Image: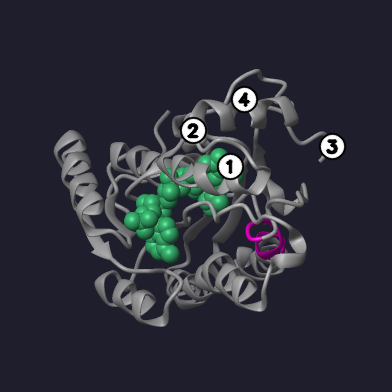
Amino acid sequence: MDLQIQGKKAIMAGGSAGMGRATAERLAEAGVELYITARREERLVNAAKEMSEKYGTTVTPIVADSSTEEGRQTLFTACPDPDILAITIKPPAPNGDFLKVTPEMWRDSIDTALIGPIEIMRNYIPVMKDKGWGRIVNIATFSAKNPMIWRLMSGPARSALINYTASVSREIAQYGVNINNILPGMFATEGADEIIGHYADAFGLAPDRETVMTHFLQNNKIPAGFVADADDMAPMAALLCSPLARFIVGQNIVIDGGQHHSLF
Ligand SMILES: NC(=O)c1ccc[n+]([C@@H]2O[C@H](COP(=O)([O-])OP(=O)(O)OC[C@H]3O[C@@H](n4cnc5c(N)ncnc54)[C@H](OP(=O)(O)O)[C@@H]3O)[C@@H](O)[C@H]2O)c1
């Protein structure tokens, strides 16, 4: 399918690994001029080089932490006028006992998973509005609508994010600027691997991948029967970044193999 975005300018904030990288790949393949950000430089620079060589398009790496004002300003300076903006972060670590969640942990979660994406959108929405076209996609989490006691550092901040985008998307759709969110379930990514130790701590398990995955699958039914790869969500993210999605406004697309059981 031709996504009709060749030559457009796109930012993938959080584009060096996992679902951000997979989304960046689909955008690069479709011929956009791409800017990808992350905090860790080496993986970011390698990702940009690999995608640029593979797809023959310009991919600019920008070391920038979306959760800080300084990081966001670095991004805004490097790419002031994108047509497409996709945003993600790494999965926040599972909390243990909810009674031990401190105000400092809440502040970190809110800075990273809520204020960062909101501030990036707030900067670029007027730019897209002036152009008369824009696409914004947040890669958040299905725990935004499926609360889990061990995902307190991820779900509540994203529930607020999708509440924000539900309102803002309806305000700006008249200018050709659409915001939608993808809410992923369980995906085997670099970020998921990095929090295995925290998951093991939270549930008192041995900190190895097999033990953690077995525990997860025993306690979380995935009707599709498998844990997804990042490529299982990237085509949907790329579609939402395209003109083909012009009538999709303010939606939250759950991609979780059927794990969240609800009508909508
Ligand atoms: N994997 C899962 O099973 C799962 C389940 C539910 C929801 N999700 C959600 O899906 C999203 C993507 O997760 P993932 O598993 O694909 O993560 P991932 O593999 O860790 O990839 C995250 C990407 O974002 C970058 N990043 C992280 N924090 C950043 C920040 N503050 N500023 C700029 N870049 C940042 C990472 O690079 P650096 O670390 O170098 O910055 C990396 O490029 C997250 O919102 C996560 O909560 C994931």
Find disc 1 in the rendering and name its residue.
Answer: 200
The residue type indicated by label 1 comes to Ala
Find disc 2 in the rendering and name its residue.
Answer: 208
Q: Does dot 2 land on a helix, a strand or a loop?
A: loop
Q: Residue at x 42, y 69 (%)?
A: 66
Q: Left or right of 48: which side holds 149? A: right
Instruction: Say which label, 3 or 4, has the lower sequence index.
Output: 4
Q: Are marks 1 and 2 in contact (CB under 8 Å)?
A: yes
Q: Measure the C-alpha gap from mark 3 to mark 1.
A: 29 Å
Q: Left or right of 123: which side holds 174? A: right
Q: Are marks 4 and 1 in contact (CB under 8 Å)?
A: no
* Residue 27 placement (x, y as % from top left): 35, 43
Q: Which residues are magenta?
A: 153-159
The residue type indicated by label 2 comes to Asp
Q: Magenta span: helix, strand or loop, mainly? A: helix
Label 4 packing within 10 angstroms: few (<14), some (14-19), many (20+): few
Instruction: Say which label, 4 or 2, has the lower sequence index.
Output: 2
Task: Determine whether the beta carbon of the residue marked 2 sits less than 8 angstroms from the nearest atom of ligand 1.
Answer: no
Quadrant in which the C terminus is drawn: top right
- Frontmost of labels 3 and 4 is 4
Q: Does dot 3 land on a helix, a strand or a loop?
A: loop
The residue type indicated by label 4 comes to Thr
Instruction: Say which label, 2 or 3, has the lower sequence index.
Output: 2
Q: Is residue 155 magenta?
A: yes
Q: Residue at x 42, y 38 (%)?
A: 3
* Residue 190 versus residue 152 in the image, above or below: above
Find disc 3 in the rendering and name its residue.
Answer: 262
